[in-house]
Amino acid sequence: MGVSDSVRIAPGSASWPRCLDTIEAAPEGLWVRGPLAVLRREPRIAIVGTRSPTPYGEGQALRFARAFARAGIVVVSGLARGIDQAAHRGALESGGDSIAVLGSGVDRPWPAGPVTDALLSSGLLVSEFPPGMGPRRHHFPLRNRIISGLAAGVLVVEAAWASGSLITARWAVDQGRTVFAIPGRVDHPMARGTLRLIREGATPVESPEQVLEDLFGSVAAALAARTGPAPKGPTPKGLAAEILAALEGETASADDLARQLGRPVARVLAELVELELAGAIARCPGGLYRRA
C-alpha cells in the first residue's frame, strides 16, 4: 500500500464526516487510507493519553477500547506509542473499527510497528497532510482537533501535567464534546493531567458503561445509534454461546443460568457482563437477563 492507495475527500462529499464542518479551523480536506466505509460509521469515541503509560493505564485503555468496540463504537486515536496504540489495538482485537488521525501523510504512518501494521490491514488512516509528508512536531497538536472533532466524546487515560492529551481535551470542550478522564494515583506524574482535567470539569469514569450511559443513555442505545455497515464481531463461543442459547425466548437470573448450565455463578456473571457490553443481552428489573 502507498500513495496510490490513498484517497482525498473534500467537504460535502459522500464520505466526508459532517461533524468536522462546525469545528474551529476545519480541515479543507482529508487524505484517507483504508476502507472509506469506516469513516461513515458512527458513533465514535476518542481515547488519548500519554506515550509513557503505566501498566495500569495501558490496561485501562485496552479495557475501554475493547468494550467500546463490542458496543459498536468506532475508536479514534492518534497512533502515538502508549495509550493511543493500546486503544487502537483493543478495538481491532475485539473485531471493531479504529481510526488513526496522523501527524504525517497517510503513506508515511508514524511510528511504525505492529499496531501500525494492524491498522493498515484492518483500520483506517486519516490525515490532513498530503502523502509524502513526514511527521513534524507542530503537526501533532494540529491533528488533535480532528481526533476530538470526529468523536462524540474524548476519554483521557493517563496524562502528565503538560500533555498533548490535554490539548485534545481542550479542543473537545471548544467543540462541544464531552470529556471523560480516568482517575489515577494522586502521587503519580501520569495522573496529574487527568486529575487536572477532572478539577476543570471533565467527567471522572470507572467503567466503559459509564461513558456509554453518559453519551447515549445505555449500551443498547449506543448500539442503536450506530450507523453505517456494522463491523464483524467474533461469533460467541463456549459459555457465551451456552448462555445465549439458554436465554432464547426466556428471561433468567445469573443464579438460574449457573444452575441450568452447571457453571460457577462468578463465571456466568462475568460472561453476562461481556454479553451486555456487546449488546447481545439486556438486563431487566429483578436481576433478570434476556436476549437483546
Image (cartoon, helix red, strand yellow):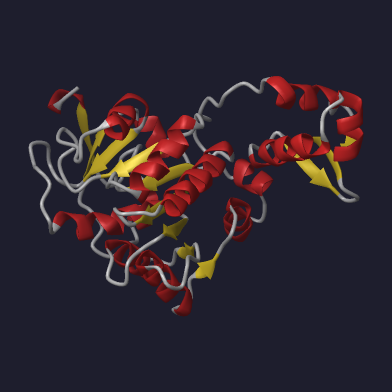
Q: Is residue 47 left or right of residue 273?
A: left
Residue located 41% across and 44% down the image: 87
Q: Residue furthest front?
A: 187
Up-down relation of residue 263 to residue 133 (above or below): above
Residue located 25% across and 36% down the image: 32
Residue located 52% across and 48% down the image: 64
Residue nearest the observer in this picture, 263 or 167: 263
Tell how many labels. 0
Image coords of residue 292 (percent x, y): 75, 35
Residue nearest the observer in this picture, 255 or 54: 54
Q: Is residue 276 left or right of residue 87?
A: right
Image coords of residue 170 (percent x, y): 34, 69
- The reply to whether residue 151 is visible in this rendering is no
Image coords of residue 111 (percent x, y): 20, 40
- The reply to whether residue 143 is visible in this rendering is yes
Q: Is residue 215 left or right of residue 81?
A: right
Split into 4 quadrants, where in the image is the N terminus?
top left
Residue located 89% across and 35% down the image: 251
Up-down relation of residue 264 to residue 164 (above or below): above
Residue nearest the observer in this picture, 40 or 262: 262
Image coords of residue 224 (percent x, y): 63, 42
Residue nearest the observer in this picture, 77 or 39: 77
The image quarter containing residue 242 is top right
Q: Residue furthest bottom?
A: 199
